[in-house]
Every structure is written in structure tokens, then in C-alpha cells.
Amino acid sequence: MAIKILLILVLVAMVLHLIKPFGLPGLTRRADVWKIALILIFAMMMALVLRPA
């Protein structure tokens, strides 16, 4: 369940960044959406590794 929520939140962040860049260091251009995708991949891997058995 947490992975689905994480996925939705990051996809919303990606869409919002395409509309208006956030202006954070490293996220100043619309073309920096791929960096948000890398954060999503890393966060999903951590959620899978750290989930309870």
C-alpha cells in the first residue's frame, strides 16, 4: 500500500514540475523531471527492501 501511495505522490510531483519547475537546487528546469524519476526508483527500492516480512 505504501508503494502505491509513494508512486502517486511522486507522479503528481513530476506533473507539477513539468507545469512549473520547483526552483530547488538541481530542479530548476522542466527537463529535470528525470531526476524526480530517479528519486522515485530509489524510494521504491528502499520501500521494498525495508518492508516487514
Image: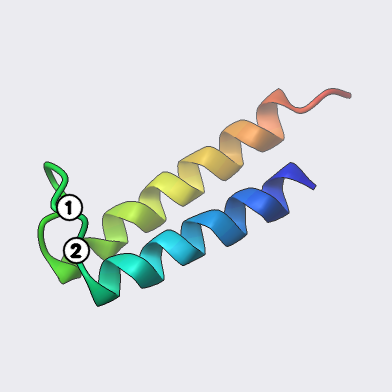
Q: How is the image coloured?
A: rainbow
Residue furthest to the right? 53
Is 40 rendered above or below residue 31?
above
Q: Quadrant of the C terminus?
A: top right
Circle 1 — which element?
Answer: loop
Q: Are marks 1 and 2 in contact (CB under 8 Å)?
A: yes
> What percent of the width, then of the height, locates residue 21?
19, 63
Please name the residue shown 69% across and 24% down the image: 50
The CA span between labels 1 and 2 is 7 Å
Crowdedness near tag 1: few (<14), some (14–19) or many (≥20) residues, C-alpha within 10 Å: some
Q: Which residue is mark 1?
A: 27
> What percent of the width, then of the height, locates residue 44?
59, 44
Type of residue at label 1? Leu
Answer left or right for 52 relative to 46.
right
Which dot marks residue 52?
Answer: none
> What percent of the width, then of the height, locates residue 37?
39, 57
Answer left or right for 45 relative to 17.
right
Question: 45 or 16: which is nearer to us?
Answer: 16
Type of residue at label 2? Pro
Is 42 rendered above or below residue 18?
above
Answer left or right for 17 relative to 11.
left
Please name the residue shown 27% across and 73% down the image: 18
Which dot marks residue 21?
Answer: 2
Please name the residue shown 52% across and 39% down the image: 43
Residue depth check, mark 1 versus mark 2: number of the one nearer the observer:
2
Is 14 rendered above or below residue 47?
below
Question: 38 or 22: which is nearer to us?
Answer: 22
> What percent of the width, then of the height, locates residue 23?
13, 52
Among the two numbered marks 1 and 2 on one chain, the one whose residue lies closer to the N terminus: 2
Count the marks: 2
